[in-house]
Amino acid sequence: MLAILPLSGAGTYADPVRPQLPSGARDAASGISFQWIPSDDGRWAIVELSARDRASLLPVLQDRRPGVLTFERGQVSRSTVEVELRRYRRNFQWEDLVGLRRPTGVGQEVKP
């Protein structure tokens, strides 16, 4: 599932910037794993969440904080999700989130 969640944290070692998950999704027993990229304005995170079962994701799906959006796989078309996510990250591509696209210059041979 994909979600738009607010970012929290001071950006220090002790308090890193990270997506602000609902309290029920933060405990280790929930079994939720996630990866994220920041929005263009740095206030939001585009988050891909996965879990062993749907019940583990319920705290995120039921999150009613202002601005929080969720998209369940198979429930919303890819084009609809892309349009919505591009409101937060102008040049959003699916590969950015799953790490398939390399940033410009990475992996290129450097000649002296």
Image (tube, helix red, strand yellow):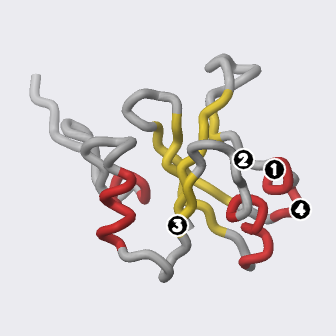
Sequence-wise, the earlier of marks 3 and 4 is 4
Instruction: Give x and y (percent) for residue 63.
Output: 72, 55
Residue under label 3: 71
Marks 3 and 4 close (CB-CB < 8 Å): no
- Residue extending farthest to the bottom is 74
Q: Residue at x 70, y 70 (%)?
A: 51
From the image, state whether disc 3 or disc 2 is nearer to you: 3
* Residue type marked 3: Phe
Quick one: SS at disc 2? loop
Residue under label 4: 29
Tag of residue 47: none
Would residue 17 be found to the left or right of residue 112 on screen?
A: right
How packed is label 3: few (under 14 Cα within 10 Å), some, or many (20 or more)? some
Sequence-wise, the earlier of marks 2 and 4 is 2
Instruction: Give x and y (percent) for residue 101.
Output: 29, 54
* Residue type marked 4: Ala
Residue under label 2: 21
